[in-house]
């Protein structure tokens, strides 16, 4: 959806965020800079000495002088390599922890975001920032950045060295610059889309291969084996064709950089010839200049080929910095965030929503002027036909969706006064989409209460009727569940979610689960578990199974986004209205 909902930092803000993270590692940064500079200077020694050697030989120098020059070259090359290694290591020392900090900040901000804000921005945007953008920045910092910095330092020192021999030689070298710029302007618009196409094609090929491997038996049993092989072949050939196009593009790009190198080198040699002829520099100095210029080929090629990678890492960094700069939800403006200790009685919080209207960004109004209060410790069931707006009202009441208009309050104070985190600390929500987190059953429970010991976990499992199936798992509480783990049924996942509510011990609970079929033993167990969890808490329950409504203190009937009936089960049956009709059809099913 709208990409403007989650901010992207400006260049200045991005640099600010990067510097804030790096400044704690100033010593490592200083060491990296010094070592890069030393490596750059030492890199000039071999061409310099080689130039000298030309003069020595021309002037009839001795073998000792030649051997001495060769030793200096060897020593300088070894020292330059050592300095470069030290610089890359020091840069890693500075950058890796900074990146880890940035990732932590971003994840913390994302976790603190209001769910409706994420929904508005599009989950894809958030996921691509914490996934792809982090990966792009990490990969670039690991490989391209040290290479680019090292190459840039080499270029800077060599250019200065060239100009120091004679300014006219420096100028001759500089004449190659426009040709490099032309090459880069040809390369950049072509490289990004082609690399993207290559990544997509490779991803499709990998997916086809993996599906084939994982589902080989099924594909063979259904007689689709050959057709699938054909699919894999088509995708592989497509990936190969795109890669060939990439190599062609690179070859043409290198031809353009070679042209720039040729122009530069010819000009340096030509200028050197003129300067030697006029006795302004020696043959050795002109040789050094040519070697200096030749030495630039590698670093310039390096900077050019990593240019787009560094550029795209910069864009990713700006998107990450945009999230890192979001205010912490604890610092929300205007909220007088309340602490647990300010809540006098855990069962003493009443939940109120008044005059609620809501329409999703892409649709009609789904809640029309809904006013509802759930007294402290009361259990209210919300019933209504599919699409009546029950889940929307549940999300609004739980503070997970900001309504288009209307007021919400908890224990006499508005949600704005509580602040988002304040509301979250008091109101627990169980939705229909319960997630089983990848980890052990213990991890799934201690998410709600990090300090809970095994006896507290077993107590929560017992009260949510889960002890039996957890004990039957291969490793009990230590069994890995979730993605790639032991599969859990939707009802078991709901039971874990209910156990988390017990452990988190929030005074207000909004429950919207429709996991089990009416009348099944799973439904009975879930109803019993929910009854235990909700006892003594203020509860708003979306009653997908009407047995959940029978157990409630009060039932509220929602129809097309408006409250149409309210009362106890018996009162509403006696009214013979919409609830009575729902009950009759449900009882018969
Ligand atoms: N995220 C959303 N974006 C757009 N429209 C939505 C969204 N969620 C729900 N709606 C629409 O809002 C209306 C109310 O949906 P809601 O899920 O609140 O009803 P419900 O009573 O809980 O239904 P059910 O019992 O099937 O869960 C429906 O018309 C639905 O299509």
Image (spheres, helix red, strand yellow):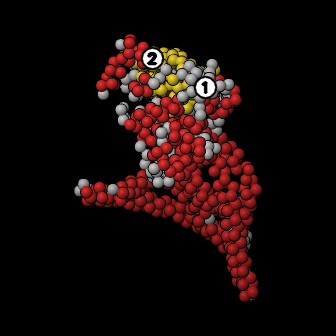
Taking depth in this image into account, of 58 and 373 the one nearest to the observer is 373
**Furthest residue toward bottom:** 63
171 left or right, relative to 569: right
Mark 2 closeness class: few <14, some 14–19, many ≥20 residues within 10 Å: some
Ligand 1 occupies quarter: top left
Question: Residue 347: which numbered mark, if any?
Answer: 1
Image point 43% across, 36% down: which residue? 525
The picture places residue 245, in percent across and down from the top left corner, at 41, 58
In percent of the image, x 50 and y 62: which residue is there?
Answer: 254
Relative to 166, is 452 above or below?
above
Where residue 468 sits in the image (x, y, percent)? 46, 45
In this view of the protein, which residue sits in the foreground, 288 or 101? 101
Image location of residue 327, percent across then percent down? 65, 35
573 displayed left or right of 447: left
Secondary structure at numbered mark 1: loop
Residue that badge 2 annotates: 568
| Crowd tier of the residue under label 1, counting other residues whose Cα lies within 10 Å: few below 14, some 14–19, many 20 or above | some
Which residue of the protein is positioned furthest toward the left in this rendering?
223
Counting residues from the start of the chain, the first of labels 1 and 2 encountered is 1
- The answer to whether one can see residue 581 in this image is yes
Query: Looking at the rendering, which quadrant does residue 56 occupy?
Result: bottom right
Q: CA distance from mark 1 to mark 2?
A: 21 Å
Q: Quadrant of residue 107?
A: top right
Q: Nearer the viewer, residue 76 or 187?
A: 76
Residue at (48, 32) in percent of width and height: 530
Mark 1 lies within 8 Å of ligand 1 (Cβ measured): no
* Above-or-below relation of 15 to 27: above
- Residue 207: horizontal and vertical position, in percent? 39, 54
């Amino acid at each position: 959806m709208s990409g403007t909902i989650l901010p992207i930092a400006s260049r200045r803000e991005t640099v600010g965020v990067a510097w804030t993270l790096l400044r704690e590692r100033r010593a490592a940064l200083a060491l990296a800079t010094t070592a890069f500079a030393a490596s750059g200077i030492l890199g000039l020694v071999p061409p310099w000495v080689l130039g000298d050697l030309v003069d020595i030989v021309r002037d009839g120098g001795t073998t000792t002088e030649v051997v001495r020059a060769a030793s200096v070259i060897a020593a300088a090359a070894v020292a330059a390599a050592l300095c470069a290694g030290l610089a890359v290591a020091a840069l890693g020392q500075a950058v890796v922890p900074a990146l880890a900090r940035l990732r932590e900040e971003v994840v913390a901000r994302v976790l603190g975001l209001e769910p409706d804000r994420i929904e508005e921005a599009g989950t894809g945007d958030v996921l691509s920032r914490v996934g792809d953008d982090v990966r792009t920045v990490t990969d670039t910092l690991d490989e391209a950045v040290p290479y680019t910095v090292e190459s840039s330092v080499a270029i800077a020192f060599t250019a200065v060295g060239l100009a120091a021999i004679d300014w006219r030689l420096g100028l001759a070298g500089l004449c190659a610059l426009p040709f490099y710029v032309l090459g880069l302007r040809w390369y950049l618009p072509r490289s990004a889309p082609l690399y993207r196409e290559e990544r997509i094609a490779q991803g499709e090929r990998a997916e086809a291969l993996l599906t084939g491997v994982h589902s080989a038996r099924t594909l063979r049993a259904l007689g689709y084996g050959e057709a699938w092989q054909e699919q894999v072949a088509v995708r592989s050939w497509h990936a190969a064709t795109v890669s060939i196009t990439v190599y062609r593009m690179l070859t043409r790009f290198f031809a353009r950089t070679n042209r720039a190198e040729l122009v530069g080198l010819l000009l340096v040699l030509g200028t050197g010839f003129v300067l030697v002829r006029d006795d302004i520099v020696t043959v050795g100095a002109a040789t050094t200049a040519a070697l200096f210029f030749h030495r630039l080929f590698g670093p310039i090629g390096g900077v050019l080929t990593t240019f787009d990678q560094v550029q795209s890492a910069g864009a990713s960094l700006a998107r990450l910095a945009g999230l890192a700069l979001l205010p912490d939800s604890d610092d929300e403006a205007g909220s007088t965030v309340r602490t647990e200790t300010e809540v006098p009685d855990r069962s003493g919080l009443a939940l109120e929503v008044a005059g609620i209207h809501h329409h999703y960004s892409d649709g009609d109004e789904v809640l029309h002027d809904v006013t509802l209060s759930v007294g402290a410790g009361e259990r209210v069931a919300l019933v209504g036909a599919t699409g009546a707006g029950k889940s929307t009202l549940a999300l609004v009441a739980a503070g997970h969706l900001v309504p288009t208009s209307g007021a919400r309050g908890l224990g006499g104070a508005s949600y704005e006064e509580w602040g988002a985190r304040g509301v979250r600390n008091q109101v627990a929500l169980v939705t229909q989409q319960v997630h089983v987190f990848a980890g052990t059953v213990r991890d799934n429970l201690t998410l709600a209460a990090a300090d809970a010991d095994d006896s507290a976990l077993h107590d929560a499992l017992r009260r949510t009727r889960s002890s039996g199936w957890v004990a039957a798992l291969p490793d009990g509480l230590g069994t890995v569940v979730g993605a790639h783990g032991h599969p859990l049924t939707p009802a078991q996942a709901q039971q874990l979610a209910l156990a988390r509510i017990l452990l988190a011990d929030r005074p207000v609970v909004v429950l919207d689960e429709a996991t089990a079929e009416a009348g099944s033993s799973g439904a009975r167990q879930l109803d019993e578990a929910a009854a235990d969890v909700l006892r003594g808490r203020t509860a708003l329950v979306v009653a997908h199974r009407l047995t959940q409504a029978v157990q409630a203190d009060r039932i509220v009937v929602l129809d097309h986004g408006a409250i149409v009936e309210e009362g106890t089960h018996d009162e509403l049956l006696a009214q013979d209205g919409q609830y009575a009709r729902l009950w009759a059809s449900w009882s018969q099913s």
